[in-house]
Structures are given as C-alpha cells and as structure tokens.
Amino acid sequence: MADYQVPLRDMNFLLYDVFKADQLWQSLPTLAERVDKETAEAILQECAKIAEQEIAPLSRNGDEVGVNFDNGKVTTAPGYKQAFDTYVEGGWTALGGEPAFGGMGMPKMLTAFHEEMLCSADISFSLYPGLTAGAGLSLAKHGSDELKERYLTRMYTGEWSATMCLTEAHAGTDLGMIRTKAIPQDDNSYLVTGTKIFITAGEHDLTDNIVHLVLAKLPDAPAGPRGISLFLVPKFHVNEDESLGDRNQVSCGSIEHKMGIHASATCVMNFDGAKGYLVGELNKGLACMFTMMNFERIGVGIQGIGAAVRSYQNALEYAKDRTQSRSLSGVQSPDKEADSLMVHGDVRRMLLNMKAMNEGSRALSTYIAMQLDIATYGDGEAQQKAEQLVALMTPIAKAFFTDLGFESAVAGQQVLGGHGYVREWGQEQLVRDTRIAQIYEGTNGVQAMDLLARKVAGSKGQLVKVFVEEVQQYIAKNTSEQMTEFLQPLAKATTELAQLSQDILTLAQDNPEELGCAANDYLHVFGYTAMAFVWAKMAEVSFMQDQASEFHQSKLHTARYFYARILPRCQSLIASATAGSDAMFDMPEDLF
C-alpha cells in the first residue's frame, strides 16, 4: 500500500481560498477568541504528522491481528496503545471539546479535516477517539454540571473514552422497541439492566475507564421512542476524590468477528443492574442521543472520504508505475516493453472518477462543516439558515459520502487488478473497512428516507428551497464569462432538483410509498447537484489564481471532468425516482 500523504494543500485551499474560513472565524466572536489562520495551519500540520507517522503504519497489522477477547477483556492490536498515548499527549482528544471543561473548542471546519486524516490513516483507530468526541458533544449539551465536571473533563484529557449504546438484538433502526430498563434509586442514580450489541469500543485497553451512554426505559415510561431516556454508565465507579473505584456491573460478553475494521472492538455489552446517571430529562433520551448521532453521521461520512482518498493514492501510484500493453494512439514509452496504465482510457476513467468525487466530497463536507459552525456560533438569519442547511445536509453527508467512498475503494481495487484482490497490497482492506460505513449510524437507505420523508416532505419542500435559492443567488452574482461552462449546467441541475422535489411530493400525496421508492435516487441527485455547486466554487477560485500553478490547473481539469462525466448521472436517477412505485409494490411477496 502506498504511504499515506495528507492532502494539506487541498485542505488549505478549501479553508482559505474557497470558503474564507479565517474571515468567518473572525466574524464570529466566540471563534475569534479561539482560532486564527496561523493556529489552524499549525494544528493541521501537526495532525498530519501523527496521522502519517504514528497511525497509518498501524493499519495493516491492526487488520491482520485484530483485537483479542479473553474472558471479558479486550486487548487491542500491537502498537495501538502506544499510538493512542501519543495521540492523547498531543491533546487531540480535546480538539473540538467545550473549553469550559478542558476542550479546545475548535470549529468543525477544522476538526472535520482532523477526522479525515485519522480515517485515511486507519478507520479502526479513528473510531476510538471518534466515539468519545461524539459522546462528549452530547454530554456537554445535555449533562448536568456535576456529570460534566466528573466525566467530560477526563474524556477530553483522553484518560477515559466513551461509547454510544443504542442497538439491541431486536431493535436497530426502530429504537422504540428497546427493552433495556432503568430502575430509579433513592440517591438519584438508576440501575440499568439489558444487553446492547454492535457497541464500538465497548471494551478495550486504551484508557483507564470507559463511559457508556446508554438508552433505556423506566418501567412506567410511555411506549415507543417517547419513553426512552439516556444514562451515563461508567465501567468503573468514580470515588468522591475523583479516583477510580470498584468495577460497575457492566461487562463485555463477546466481540463480533467482522468483514472489516478488525482493529476496532465491536462488543456485546451486558448491563446487569449497573449504576448509571440520567443525562438530560426523563423520556427525552433520544433527542439527547441524536446530538451525538448527528455528529457521528457526519463523521461516518468523513470515513467514506478518508478511505476514498487512501484508495486514490494507492491506485494512482500503482497506475503510474505498472506497465501493461500499449496506448491506442501509439507507443508512449518506447524505452519500455509496455506503456504505463495511465495511457488507458478506462484506467483514467476510474482515477478521475475517484479524484473528482474525493475532492468534491471534501469540498462539500467543508461546506456542511461551515454551516455547522455558523449554526453553533452565529446569530440571526444566518444562524437560522445554517441550521436548516445542516438538517438538510446531514443525511447526505452520511449516505452520499459513504456510497462514493465504497465506490472509490472498489475502483482502486479494480485499478490494481489481481493485486487489488490479494492482501499483500492492502487495497482489499480498504474495501472491507469502508463497507460498514454504509450500514452503521443508520443505514444509507434510512438516511435517504430521513432526507426525503422527514426533511423534504416534512418541511413541504421549504428546506430544499433554502439550498436552491443559495445556489441560484451564487449563479446570479457570478457574471464571469469563463465560468459559463460550469454555471449553465449547475443552473440546469439545480432547477431539475427543485422540480424533482416537487414532482415526488405531488406523487406522494396520493401514495406515500412513493417516498420510500424514490428516496435513494433522490438523495444521490441531491448529492451530485450539491457537489456541482462546490465544484463551481473551486473552479471560480482556480480561474482567479496564477494559471501556471499545477494545483489550480488540476482543479479546472477535474471540475470539467466532473461536469462532463459524473453530473450526468443525475439524468438516469431522476428517471428512476419518478418512475413510480408500481414496479416495486405490484409484485406479490410470494413471487419474490
């Protein structure tokens, strides 16, 4: 596998040239006190070092060895503990945390790139601090000051890690069916009893304590999701002097043997009257957990980007070095017995697909991160608009980026041919590791339904209107003739997205099944259209730069490829999305 190289040049291009992050940070008083361009550049440079030098080298062996389970104890792969300690010493576990409790409070535009680096280096490793960061967000927003002082501060230092415990054997997407119970005690604690499955980092040897955020119901709670509460259940009790006490009644019953992410411990967790503490209000646990889940969904989308970037780097290095056959237009390397793979049209198709989708995904992810920062730290109409765009874009970030990430991982494998299928070259690991991203944190089909049924239909199309109007305003303000090649197809795609939204809503008035049948196609039309928007922004900036720059020339070439060869995918997706539900539902179940 090629050595991972962090694309810092592209990250800085997006931050400062395309989205003017430094200007945005200075316009938001809270962020202006925390971060400037110089600080941000130093953070990314240092994070790049640890990703390239400490974490990426662990990936292959972590996959080969995996985690070991022995009588309830989980041991991570060799080198993981040392790398995690180095990561903690650098203060990275506090990067996006609440400053009042020891976090650095960095903006999402910055932490998103940090997440991408970790995912490109090793998705398995990234999950340990990633889950803790997400749990920290939920605890910071909904926990009591006492819980935050006792637990959140130690999560930020990296001494303790955290999990999210939602899924049960019979309750995955439908969390209203959970059976885990919480019995109130006289000291305001609760005894939590039940079994949770698929718990990432539920047990390991990286930290001294593990803080579980557990969904459970009181015996008299309302039925369904309205009766769910959230509890903090530590692996070890914490004494009044902040030292660790006895083991709580929580244990790891087993670990899953998975297709990929072998170095990540995926656990069955048993809570046998474990002492826990309420987070937020009773019966409002799902809302509290969604603070974490929405963070994780964007983070999982970034996993797709990270894996796709690593796949592209592997495939590009291989394609330039590997010689096979001759170019159709004549010999290109007469001093060699064959030309490199780079002369072949189909190889270039796969590489350019990866390049265009990777850079477009990173740009769209940065755009979404910018909206998160404005929603968190802004005010007035700008904050309201950002909140609407975040709600709209979160399912796209999770599903679209991971679908494209898996597509790019497979494309990289295809470029390597037979070498991509064997373990020696490492590419097949990326395919296996990336596959889960389309499944966990809400399958991509669920994300598509969230987008179309809850966000689009639920707002009667108003959320889509917010995005469409922003794109239209951008097009109207950009009068540069050289941008016509991008703005005309962007205008067409945006108009078609708006029309598609209305057409599906009209069909669904008579038959609600239309939403489920069109959702996946719709999400991808939206994703490609949104990606066209950010590609236009990147092309605009590249036109304004010195044309001698290979970086900006590459951007323009890639933008043209995206518009010529990838954006047209929308046409077939629109046809499928508006074909109606009859073809799916007319067939009796017995005939399947």
Image: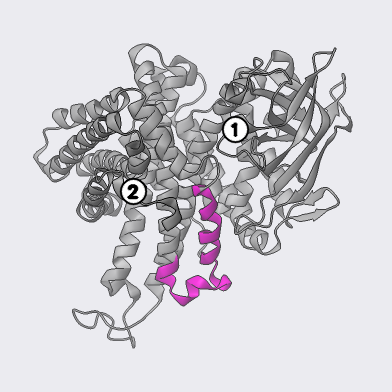
Q: Nearer the viewer, residue 13 or 222?
A: 222
Quadrant position of residue 200: top right
Q: In the image, which is nearer the foreground, mark 1 or mark 2?
A: 2
Q: Is residue 397 magenta?
A: no
Residues under numbered marks 1 and 2 in contact, where contact means CB atoms less than 8 Å apart: no
Percent coordinates x, y for residue 1 in the rendering? 53, 66
Q: What residue is disc 2 on?
A: 586
Q: How is the image coloured?
A: one colour
The label on residue 544 is none
Percent coordinates x, y for residue 184 in the rendering? 79, 17
Disc 1 or 2, which lies upstream in sequence? 1
The label on residue 175 is 1
Crowding at mark 1 (Cα within 10 Å: few <14, some 14-19, many 20+): some
Left or right: where 88 falls relative to 540: right
Crowding at mark 2 (Cα within 10 Å: few <14, some 14-19, many 20+): few
Identify the residue shown where x is 66% and y is 50%.
Answer: 264
* Disc 2 secondary structure class: loop
Q: Amino acid at mark 1?
A: Leu
Q: Is residue 428 magenta?
A: yes
Q: Amino acid at mark 2?
A: Asp
Percent coordinates x, y for residue 457 in the rendering? 33, 27
Looking at the image, is 491 positioned above or below residue 560? above
Identify the residue shown where x is 56% and y is 47%.
Answer: 118
> In this view of the protein, can residue 174 be seen by the observer?
yes
Q: Nearer the viewer, residue 82 or 440?
A: 440
Quadrant position of residue 235: top right
- Spatial CA distance of label 1 from label 2 is 30 Å
Looking at the image, is 76 positioned above or below residue 235? below
Q: Which residues are magenta?
A: 413-438
Instruction: Work out which quarter of the rendered image holds the C terminus and state it.
Output: bottom left
